[in-house]
Amino acid sequence: MAKHGKKYMAALAKVNLDTVYSPKEAVALAKETSYANFDASVEVHLRMGLDPRQADQQVRDVVVLPNGLGKTVRVLVFAQGEGATKAQEGGADYVADTDEMINKIAAGWTDFDVTIATPDMMAKVGKLGRVLGPRSLMPNPKAGTVCAAEDLPRVINEAKAGRVEFRLDKTANIHVAIGKASFTAEKLFQNFAALMEAIKKARPTGAKGTYIRKISVAATMGPGLKVDPLQAVTISLEE
């Protein structure tokens, strides 16, 4: 059994492992129990009552967190012609409009956080699946990262403002960062509420029974906190 350090044990001492916390209590305590010597992320982990093997039980969508993620988001756009111009005007950090740039990515360069593409570029982007796929950087229409040239400025702005993708993984879990430990508890709660609203709206047609079984919140380096799923799905940003 792995041994935990003094900092972890000190943080754990502030947590009642038998308590199921309200969302507000959980995010505040996750912030308090973060013991990293850097500005750690605060993450939400959900155990879903879904079968990821079934096509009608998939969850994949995006949410714009009202307070962002607390980090600089580097956006790369695959576009050409008018799309490339729109991307540059819209604030993209990189525009992949040449074979030279695409070959650079194919060779393993991935110094960016989000990729967006126009439909006419997807044939070329598809060839980069081996590089982009494992890093969850592949543009996808369901995630809103494949869009028309005229929509690029809006999508780029959303990505930089805190647009986060969430999806069901093969173990029926969803993992999403909602901000930094340096955020106020109120800002973390607002981001949590926005995420839960988006996950409720993304409920697939094939979902049966309990949609969200368990929820926990934790800092990157900090103990996990159980969250009451019933309270989590009934909160709103107006609280």
Image: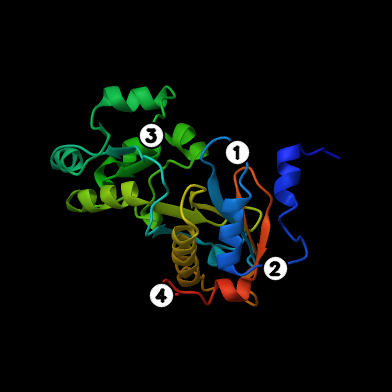
User: Picture coordinates of residue 176 (x, y %)?
Assistant: 53, 53
Give the SS element for disc 3: loop
Distance from Cα at disc 1 to Cα at disc 2: 24 Å
Q: Earlier in the sequence, mark 2 or mark 3?
A: 2
Q: Amino acid under label 1?
A: Ala
Q: Are marks 1 and 2 in contact (CB under 8 Å)?
A: no
Question: How busy is the neighbourhood of tag 2: few (under 14 within 10 Å), some, or many (20 plus)?
Answer: some
The label nearer to you, 2 versus 3, is: 2
Give the SS element for disc 4: loop
Question: How busy is the neighbourhood of tag 4: few (under 14 within 10 Å), some, or many (20 plus)?
Answer: few
User: Picture coordinates of residue 55 (x, y %)?
Assistant: 55, 63
At 60% from the left edge and 65% from the top edge, which residue is drawn? 25
User: Picture coordinates of residue 165 (x, y %)?
Assistant: 44, 53
Q: Amino acid under label 4?
A: Glu
Query: Is residue 18 toward the left or the right of residue 170 in the image?
Result: right
Distance from Cα at disc 2 to Cα at disc 3: 37 Å
Question: How busy is the neighbourhood of tag 3: few (under 14 within 10 Å), some, or many (20 plus)?
Answer: few
Distance from Cα at disc 1 to Cα at disc 4: 31 Å
Is residue 230 depicted above or below 92 in this figure? Answer: below
* Image disc number at residue 112: 3
At 65% from the left edge and 46% from the top edge, which residue is drawn? 222
Q: Amino acid under label 3?
A: Phe
